[in-house]
Amino acid sequence: MTGNESRFANGPFKGQTLGQAWPAMTPEWVGTAFARDPLFPLLVKFIFADEKLSVQVHPDDSYAAEHEQAAGGRGKTEMWYALRARPGAEVLVGLRAEATAESFRRAIADGTAENCLLHVPLSQGEAIFVPARTAHTIGSGLVLCEIQQQSDLTYRVYDYNRRDAQGRARELHIEKALAVMRFGPQKGGKTKPVAMKNSAMTKTFIAACRYFLTEKWEFTEPVAAASSNEHFEILITLEGNGEISFGGARVEYGPAQTWLIPAGLGKFELRPHAPTSLLRTYPPASVDAARRELAAAGLKETEISRLVHT
Ligand SMILES: [Zn+2]
């Protein structure tokens, strides 16, 4: 939904793709606090997992910068929020403590790679943080909203011996995967959100890292909000509909939309016509900046440490 080919449906960039509009965006749009990258920094997707995804891993920035310049040179840290989950649905994130490069290589060869991964049951409304270098796959029966670094670097290690209609298997990248994969103590997994209620809404802080800070907003009454001049933000509507009003203008929102809120927008208001839930995500200037924003929102130090992944 924020890929380079995604098109603006309204606003001054209406009709343009994000890939076209991004280089033309001024600091009033992008924000003042981070270095410009040729690519829009975040990729937001909805994933409808009817079948299991391949077992895969993404490199981190330093490996990508050294070995993958031709493919953009960026690693990929990601998070998944479960919009729908069938009973028993699970994701596989991280390797078991006893897994080694040798045992994992053998498991790939004999078709039991899944057994080396940690199985994490996932229910609607829960979220998973998947740092770069973490082996992972998504089971069937899930609809996820994925928020991630914009990067194409995926090293597939196992695809359940599936073939496409032409009988071809997807390419595997076992050596690169084993070179970047984290063995031993794992990072990431199910997030431990912190919910804060006020009269207008419930704001649930889900996860933060140097690439994104993600919250869920649930409201039935009008909500007053304001952009930060440091960074743009993305609102991903999950359910509900209503209006966004700003500077005398009004636009209608509906479910499953992605809104780019410019850094310089200033005050805006969300007026729901139906109970609304949305994800708000943005790239903080740094991990410290993310901590500061969480502290400014009233979170305690222990809560901030629970949310921030370094
Ligand atoms: Zn992934």
Image: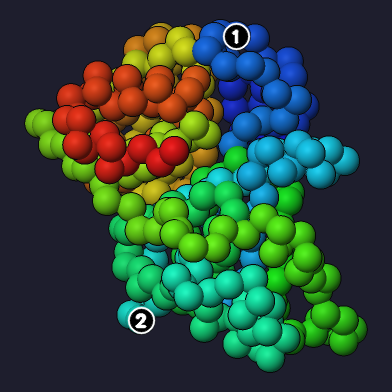
- Tell me if residue 96 can be seen: yes
**Residue topped by disc 2:** 88
For the C terminus, the quadrant is: top left
Dot label at residue 27: 1
Q: Position of residue 89 (x, y in %)?
A: 40, 77
For the N terminus, the quadrant is: top right
- 59 displayed left or right of 240: right
Callout 1: helix, strand or loop?
helix
Tell me the amino acid under the disc marked 2: Gly
Determine the CA span between mark 2 and mark 1.
Answer: 46 Å
Residue at the image position 26 percent from the left and 47 percent from the top: 193
Judging depth in this view, the residue of 116 and 5 nearest the camera is 116
- Tell me if residue 273 can be seen: no
Quadrant assignment, res 126? bottom left
- 196 displayed left or right of 280: left
Which residue is at the far left? Answer: 199
Judging depth in this view, the residue of 9 and 23 nearest the camera is 23
Callout 2: helix, strand or loop?
loop
- Look at the numbered disc 2 and say if its residue's Cβ is closer than 8 Å to ligand 1: no
Tell me the amino acid under the disc marked 1: Pro
Neighbor class of circle 1 (other Cα within 10 Å; few <14, some 14-19, many 20+) is some
